[in-house]
Amino acid sequence: MESSKETGYQPREGPILCINNCGFFGSAATMNMCSKCHKDMVLKQQHAQFAAASIENMVNCSSINQKEPLPVDVSVEVELKLDSPQPNPNPVPSEPKPKEGPSRCNTCRKRVGLTRFSCRCGNLFCSVHRYSDKHECPFDYRSAAQEAIAKANPLVKAEKLDKI
């Protein structure tokens, strides 16, 4: 007992529950919160700092153009953005996406599913028509190969020597 008085160590009487009453145990290292609650709190703080910095940048950019600083209470705006989701201010009616049917071979129109092969011409083909000679591919493989070789092997030429 005397060594505990010297070091100032006092044993706890029991485990500490999370201060958010989530049912898990907290620790002093995480401000008496469980690891999940502590992680959520840190993420909220980071989002708030990021939002405050972006609002500050927007205010600084607009004040350069207007030559007057705009009075903005950053903390109030950040709290509003985090607490209540705001609807889209400019609702634009989105065009309905056309229903995409099952992927089919461009030559025989056979369903290909997961076994589809995409060609360099940009089309999908089945296993029978996957080769370029089987589907009359318009892609020019020869010029593509020549360009790749030219990029991979640059011309190396030594400087001319002056004759004595």
Image: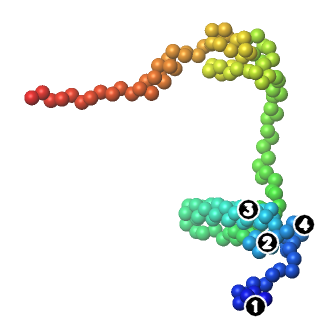
- Contact check, label 3 and label 2, Cβ < 8 Å: no
User: Residue 92 location in percent, x, y?
Assistant: 78, 43
Q: Marks 1 and 4: which is nearer the front?
A: 1
Residue picked out by circle 3: 43
- Residue 136 at x, y = what percent? 64, 9
Say which element carries label 3. Answer: helix
Q: Are marks 2 and 1 in contact (CB under 8 Å)?
A: no
Q: Amino acid at mark 2?
A: Ser
> Which mark identifies residue 27?
2
- Provide the residue designation for mark 4: 23
Give the number of the mark in front: 3 or 2. Answer: 2
Q: Please name the amino acid that badge 1 sits on.
A: Glu
Visible residue check, residue 55: no
Query: Nearer the N terminus, badge 4 or badge 3?
Result: 4
Give percent across and percent down for residue 144.
52, 20
Asked if 102 appears above or below 16 in the picture, the reply is: above
Q: Amino acid at mark 4?
A: Gly
| Comes first in the chain, label 1 or label 4 | 1
Q: How is the image coloured?
A: rainbow
